[in-house]
Amino acid sequence: MFRPVALELPVCSRSRACRAWTTASGGSAASITNRLRPVVVAMDAMAEGDLSRTVAVGGRDEIGTMAGAVDRATASVRQTSRSVEAGRRAGGELSGLSTELQQLVGRFKRV
């Protein structure tokens, strides 16, 4: 079952280097956390088998790029899962056809 994640960056808020980076980049630890939260939620959902989630984080920075990669990975796993299921169904159908063919061959041998 999906479990929400509390995403906090307490170390970053106390680190001078982190504060300098967030100030220089025009962001804050809270805004970074807020932008990362949907990515973490989507990845946790994927880990639990929920492949329906997407990440609605825009931007061309590292977080936006990562969010796009998570969406593409989720879509790829979703497609692979569908392909495997289709193959499983087709395998079951082939197995049934094989059984029918064996029965028909057995009938012809008796004739």
Image (cartoon, rainbow, N blue to C red):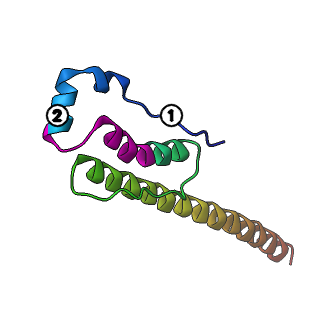
Name the residue rendered at 47%, 54% in the picture: 77
Residue named by callout 2: 21
The quarter of the picture where the C terminus appears is bottom right
Q: Which amino acid does label 1 sit on?
A: Ala
Asked which secondary structure carries label 2, the reply is helix
The residue stretch that appears in magenta: 24-39
Residue named by callout 1: 6
Left or right of 75 on screen, residue 12: left
Name the residue rendered at 13%, 39% in the picture: 24
Looking at the picture, tell me which residue is in the foreground, 47 or 13: 13
Left or right of 65 on screen, residue 88: right
Looking at the picture, tell me which residue is in the foreground, 33 or 1: 33
Q: Image quarter for residue 51?
A: bottom right
Left or right of 81 on screen, residue 27: left
Looking at the picture, tell me which residue is in the foreground, 91 or 71: 71
Magenta stretch containing residue 10, yes or no? Answer: no
Q: Distance between the residues labelled 1 and 2?
A: 23 Å
Asked if 24 appears above or below 79 in the picture, the reply is above
Q: Callout 2: few (<14), some (14-19), or many (20+) C-alpha neighbours within 10 Å? A: some
* Magenta stretch: helix, strand or loop mostly: helix
Q: Which amino acid does label 2 sit on?
A: Trp
Asked which secondary structure carries label 1, the reply is loop
Residue 12, percent from left and from top: 29, 26
Earlier along the polypeptide chain: callout 1 or callout 2?
Answer: 1
Residue 106, percent from left and from top: 81, 69
Q: Image quarter for residue 34?
A: top left
Residue 65, percent from left and from top: 26, 52
